[in-house]
Image (cartoon, grey):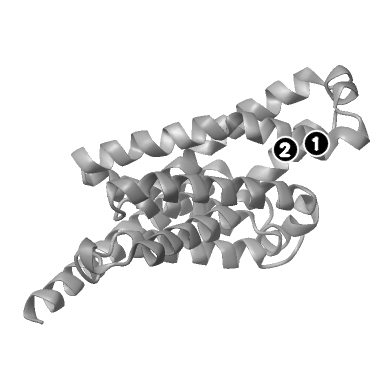
């Protein structure tokens, strides 16, 4: 362990921590949105389990990052999943909180976090893996894990902050869902199949697709939410 710290590339550690803090904003939003329907006591459990799962997923994906992003249609499938999650987050719950069992609620929240984080991590892990390449080969995975563990408190703090904002300003949920749509749009136009056939997307095209997908999630989610509320009122 001592040898690991003595030979550690602190520049690479700093880069990984900064990358994960910047990209961790997405994680914080997803974790907060997924946990917003839990009781106050269950929220911290959901945040902790969701964060642990998200970090574990990211470490696992680091080793296969370059291979994953070279799989045709993977980012397209991931983008569609992210669009679905964004729409789903805007829908009202089936019933009141006291009718939902604690374990089931936490498991549902963690499942949502893991699915969304898996999809969003496809791009994020490339940046982290790139920063780790400057380190000694034997230390690369350890370096990534160390950098991620240091950034865990920031992700947890970010999630609790977003949850407080959601409680005070429900419109934050809509912005969070739009963010997932925006990320999905970027993934759609950067899939290897799309790039090979149409070339690298221009900045304008990428921004346009991201905006359309963000508006699609909010529009579709809002419409489905209205229908679901009307149906619940009639029932």
Find residue 75 and name its label. Answer: none
Residue 11 visible in the snapshot: yes
**How far is disc 1 from disc 2 in space, using C-alphas?**
5 Å
Find residue 145 and name its label. Answer: 2
Q: Secondary structure at mark 1?
A: helix
On-image quarter of the N terminus: top right
Q: Position of residue 70 (x, y in %)?
A: 77, 59
Q: Are marks 1 and 2 in contact (CB under 8 Å)?
A: yes
Q: Position of residue 68 (x, y in %)?
A: 74, 58
Q: Is residue 145 left or right of residue 140?
A: left
Residue 201 visible in the snapshot: no
Name the one closer to the observer, 200 or 62: 62
Q: Secondary structure at mark 2?
A: helix
Residue at the location (20% across, 73% down)? 228
Q: Position of residue 73 (x, y in %)?
A: 66, 68
Say if 173 sits above or below 159 in the image: below
Residue at the location (78% across, 54% down)? 64
Q: Is residue 89 left or right of residue 69?
A: left
Q: Position of residue 83 (x, y in %)?
A: 44, 62
Find residue 142 and name its label. Answer: 1
Name the one closer to the observer, 4 or 178: 4
Quadrant in which residue 172 is drawn: top left
Q: Is residue 39 left or right of residue 168?
A: right
Classify mark 2: residues with Cα within 10 Å, few (<14), some (14-19) or many (20+): many
Classify mark 1: residues with Cα within 10 Å, few (<14), some (14-19) or many (20+): some
């Amino acid at each position: 362990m001592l040898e690991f710290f003595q030979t550690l590339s602190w520049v690479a550690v700093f880069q990984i921590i900064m990358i994960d803090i910047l990209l961790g904003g997405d994680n914080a939003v997803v974790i907060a949105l997924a946990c917003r329907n839990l009781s106050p006591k269950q929220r911290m459990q959901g945040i902790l389990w969701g964060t642990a799962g998200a970090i574990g997923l990211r470490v696992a994906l680091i080793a296969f990052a370059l291979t994953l992003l070279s799989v045709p249609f993977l980012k397209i499938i991931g983008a569609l999943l992210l669009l679905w999650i964004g729409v789903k987050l805007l829908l009202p719950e089936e019933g009141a909180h006291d009718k939902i069992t604690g374990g089931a609620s936490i498991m549902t929240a963690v499942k949502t976090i893991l699915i969304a984080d898996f999809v969003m991590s496809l791009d994020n892990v490339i940046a982290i893996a790139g920063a780790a390449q400057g380190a000694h080969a034997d230390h690369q995975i350890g370096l990534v894990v160390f950098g991620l563990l240091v950034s865990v408190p920031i992700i947890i703090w970010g999630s609790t902050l977003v949850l407080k904002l959601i409680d005070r300003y429900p419109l934050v949920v809509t912005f969070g869902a739009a963010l997932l749509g925006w990320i999905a749009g970027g993934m759609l136009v950067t899939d290897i199949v799309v790039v090979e056939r149409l070339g690298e997307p221009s900045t304008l095209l990428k921004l346009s697709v991201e905006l359309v997908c963000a508006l699609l999630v909010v529009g579709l989610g809002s419409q489905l939410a209205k229908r679901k509320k009307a149906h619940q009122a009639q029932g």
